[in-house]
Image (cartoon, grey):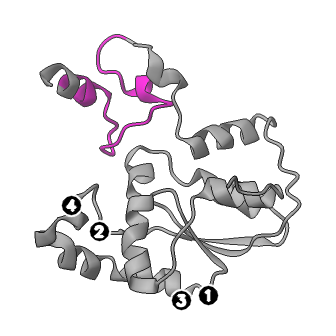
Amino acid sequence: IDLSLEWLAQHQSAAGGWSAAGFDANCKLNRCSGPGENTYDVGEYLAKLKNEGKLDTSFNTPQGKLAYHIPCHLRAQNIGQPFTKILAGAAGTTVDAIEECSAFDGTWGMKTEYYDHSRRCSQKLCRQMKNSEADRFVSDCMMAGLNVIEETGRAPVHPIEVLRDAYGMKPEE
């Protein structure tokens, strides 16, 4: 555990986060390499392919208006919102990116003693999702979606599901 904490401290950005794609940019000692240099969040990887001109963006099915919750873990890891530009590239699709806290914090929001507080703290996110009048709710974090479901009655889908649908593919049964 001590070695892991030491490694994290040596690779933390000034903003306090980590990036699997760029972890070595924050090396405080010798430049290192390893599995992290080829490890990506799925949206981060697809955005990389898009920037390199290697992602097929010939989407043939409009997705309407999407309320896209940008989860905290993507911001903390300096990944940002990679799916925003990709999803917005589909004809007939608009993306309302919402950067608000879901107040879930891993499993904190599921604990009995914090559950009500978590739901209260997620109100800003849930209000924005509801007020967006979106056709679909989208989030990279299904844990965060639990508070959205409780407050709005609508379950967010993962952005990869939206991409599947934009390509005109059918979900597996």
| Position of residue 103 measured from the top left corner of the image (x, y, whole percent) | 29, 68
Q: Is residue 107 above or below residue 128?
A: above
For marks 4 and 3, the one nearer the N-term is 4
Give the label on residue 133, or none: 1
Front in this rendered view, residue 129 or 16: 129
Above or below, comparing residue 68 to residue 39 in the picture: below
Q: How much space separates mark 3 and mark 2, taking CA atoms?
A: 19 Å
- Identify the residue at horizontal 62%, vertical 37% (top origin): 45
- Return the x and y of residue 42 as percentages of the image width and height: 58, 42
Q: Name the element at disc 3.
A: helix
Pointer 4 or 1: first along the chain: 4
In this view, the residue in front, 42 or 124, is 42
Which residue is labeled 2 in the image? 103
Would you name the residue on which mark 4 appears?
Answer: 108
Asked which secondary structure carries label 1, the reply is loop
Which mark identifies residue 169? none
37 is higher (above) or lower (below) than 164:
above
**Contact flag, marks 4 and 2 (Cβ < 8 Å):** no
**171 horizontally vs 23: left or right:** right
Q: Amino acid at mark 4?
A: Trp
What range of the chain is rendered magenta?
Answer: 6-30
Mark 3 neighbour class, 10 Å CA radius: few under 14, some 14 to 19, many 20 or more: few
